[in-house]
Image (cartoon, rainbow, N blue to C red):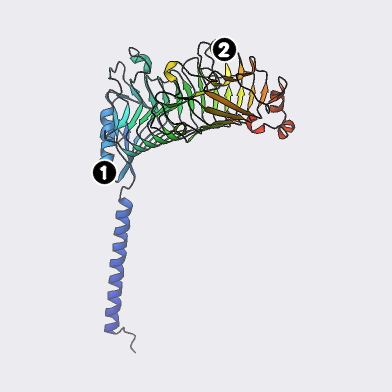
Amino acid sequence: MSGKIPEHRWGNRKKIIIFSIILILIIAIVIFFLSAKPSGKIVYVTTDGSGDFNCDGTDDQVEINKALAYVAENPQFSTVYLRGHSTYVISNSIFIGSNTVFEGDSTAVIKLKDKAGWKEEKPLITQIDSAGNQNIIIKGFEIDGNHDNNSELDRGKGYYNLIHFVNSENIQVHDIYMHDSHGDGLKVSRSSNIQFYNNTVYKLGHDALYTISSSNVEAWNNNITSRTNSGLRVYNTNHVKFNNNAIDSEGEGGAGIEVQKADPSTVMDDIEICNNLLYETNAAGVWITGYGSKYSKDSAKDVYIHHNKFYKTGTNQGADWAGGIVLNGFNNTLIENNLFDGCYGAAIAHKQVTNEFSAPGSGYTTVVKNNIIVNTQPSHAAGKGYAIYNKLRNTHSFILENNCLSNNAGGNYMFANSTTDVKVDPGFVEQVSKNDSMKKDFQWSEALSAGPQKPY
């Protein structure tokens, strides 16, 4: 052998080398194009000229809508992002399409222009398709309703709702700071799968969350200060959970949480309110009312209210519906393991709020057990400070079991009674709350630790 590679062997090796090089090139090209594909790519909106779309502080909805339309028309994009330390002033609505994330820095502010002059029910942010959209996330930025510079219009009349969706599904609104508006924060109608969480809401013109004829609604970890109406409200809506929210008001507004049934054909039998802190609300901490045309009690039943803290709720001395929980028109409501401390009028009451809210028929029951009810205070309109007050004794009744009662100014019962409730000395519950060894053996320890442990 001379050491030379036979010609046929060299030819085969050459083919293998060439094939390998081609294969490597193909793989490299595929990897390059896959990595270059803008799947889930973000479209940026700014005010400093560095974005994909750039605003100038006037009619900024024009550029924002162009960005949102671009994402809606190009499925490989998913997100419109507002860069922060900027205020985006809008003179018309912002429209979002399906499968879209509308996000921003916490220092990015969408603000309604001064003297906008919009008609009723025209929101700041809404859907692009009037027939409905789905899979929408709104998060991260601030929405300023600019109430004071549009003060010629009344609050709570449908003007300048911040976000509104109709016939839509899979909507998330979270980590938004929304404030100073004429209307609702998030309003949804005939929609499903709504999530509202981690938001800070301050002094809106109606409800922070208002759902109408909808289903599968959850709100959690929100901090809400009401001004005109409720914090969280469901109307003819089922499959609802409100948990771990802190809701108050500063001498204005209505109930902290409102549950309302007015449609006889709507079933509301799956509503849970738990682990919330309701404090110094203007009217009731929780108001539940069914009314209007005759309906079966099976269509309004089984509301479950547990492990909430009600602190000094119902501060408005002129409101008959002040108190901790005020309810009528719902059957088999279960109220357990809650702490009521310093509520005004009554901690828990069956009441009809004006003639409009008359419940059909009779035989409604409310079960109240294992709660702590202490320090209830008198209210000029709502009662003398009862633990339990049944103002609808001809049509509604209480079943009271093993509640801990103390220092209620008007007495423990008005038109109600119990053989298993326990009365303790004034100040005893407060003493237990400060003593860990006493807590261990305290029969109502669950109620004592109810609600998110936030300052108030």
Which secondary structure, mark 2? loop
The circle on residue 74 is 1
Total numbered labels: 2
Identify which residue is drawn at 25% across, 41% down: 73
- Residues at discs 2 and 1 in contact (Cβ within 8 Å): no
In percent of width and height, residue 437 lies at: 74, 33
| Residue 405 visible here | yes
Q: Of label 2 and label 1, which has the lower sequence position?
A: 1
Question: Considering only vertical position in the picture, is 191 above or below 203?
Answer: below
Q: Return the residue nearer the eye: 203 or 155.
A: 155
Q: Amino acid at mark 1?
A: Asn
Q: Quadrant of residue 10?
A: bottom left
Identify which residue is drawn at 28% across, 22% down: 91
Q: Return the residue nearer the eye: 337 or 45.
A: 337
The circle on residue 296 is none
- Disc 2/disc 1 C-alpha distance (Å): 59 Å
Question: Considering only vertical position in the picture, is 249 above or below 299?
Answer: above
Q: Amino acid at mark 2?
A: Ser
Write down the residue under mark 2. 379
- From the image, which quarter does the N terminus lie in? bottom left
Q: Quadrant of residue 378?
A: top right
